[in-house]
Image (tube, rainbow, N blue to C red):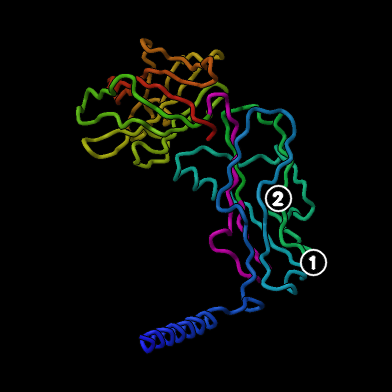
Amino acid sequence: MKNIISKSLLALGMLAMVLSSCIDDDLVPLGDQGQTLVKILEGPEQNFFFSPFTEVKTMDAFSLRKDANSNATLKTASTFVLTQSQAMIDSFNVHNGETFEALPDDFFKLANSAFEKSGDGYKVNFASGDFSKEFTIELDGSKWTDLGKKYALAFAVSDAGGYNLSSSKDSILVFFSIKNKYDGNYEVEATQPMLDVTNSALVGNYPIDADLHTTGANSVAMFSNSANGADFYNYTHPILNGPDASQYGNFAPIFNMDSDGKVISVTNFYGQGTNSSGRSARLDPTGVNKFTVNDDGSKTLEVKYILVQAGGVDRTFFTEKWTYKGER
């Protein structure tokens, strides 16, 4: 018995030595052998949502970092270059059905002297010991008179000062949007079954996790996140096609309210009959059609509307209750 125990202890000891040897081989001190990485910390996207404002807000839009591999590198002064890119904004709009415009120059003032305007971008100066510089701006809300407009800044690191550039954080899109009081995240339920009169196989896929995105002072568009676990993440209305999750192409309702929250019209985010499917939307006046702040502070939108097919045919009827869950 003692012999067996001794052999077992010996085997465990040898295994520990092997493991220790493997661990020692794998642990190589980073020191000067590591890479110094230049990156935009918040990349590739950063979102800011505001309630309407007229004052000047000071804010950090993003930060440029130098992750130094040694103290000597950290103490070396560096200059990097950020180049502004309209093409990045245009590409994002095309691939996401969005309408962001470049943030006008007179909307903001740069508040960090380390960023020096140069051509279509900025030189960013890091002194000895600097590892991060914030792109701090003063955003003037009084310039933002059209609440339906959304803006963006887009930058790419075009010169990393001889250091390595992070491939996943070498650029950034910073989005600025104004929220109205209806904007937020909602759970959408059907208070009457969805009815598609042209195809009975198409039915509602509720509950839907959706956002309402501000498109104007009193208007919001449906942005789907998921429906019964099926992810969409775009301006659309999820449905079921038999057992399969689907969506109506080129269709997402915009709810237009008056100042009291009464829904006065429903339109299509993709245009009224001008999109490739020719679809539009209209309000069904027989519904409640009202945004309500309830006595307990909860918020609900009850609305009845119709997807109108090309040629003016009333195709799909929706009767829904949207329950506010929180900010998006």
Q: Residue at x 61, y 69 (%)?
A: 164
Q: Is residue 91 magenta?
A: no
**Which image quarter holds the N terminus?**
bottom left
Q: Which residue is mark 1?
A: 128
Relative to 55, does residue 154 appear above or below in the rendering? below
Q: Nearer the viewer, residue 79 or 3?
A: 3
- Give left or right: position of 267 versus 313: right
> Label 2 vs label 1: CA separation?
19 Å
Residue type marked 1? Ser
Q: Label 2: few (<14), some or many (≥20) within 10 Å?
A: some
Disc 2, SS: strand
Q: Residue at x 75, y 46 (%)?
A: 110
Q: Are marks 2 and 1 in contact (CB under 8 Å)?
A: no
- Give left or right: position of 87 versus 96: right
Q: Residue furthest top?
A: 286
Q: Position of residue 73 (x, y in %)?
A: 72, 72
Residue type marked 2? Phe
Relative to 167, does residue 142 appear above or below in the rendering? above
Q: Which of label 2 and label 1 is nearer to you?
A: 1
Disc 1, SS: loop
Q: Earlier in the sequence, mark 2 or mark 1?
A: 1
Residue 135: give its label: 2
Q: Position of residue 82 (x, y in %)?
A: 66, 57
Q: Nearer the viewer, residue 257 or 118?
A: 257
- Give left or right: position of 325 versus 71: left
Q: Residue at x 60, y 28 (%)?
A: 147
Q: Position of residue 236 (x, y in %)?
A: 38, 34
- Which residues are the magenta region? 155-183
Q: Nearer the viewer, residue 181 or 147?
A: 181
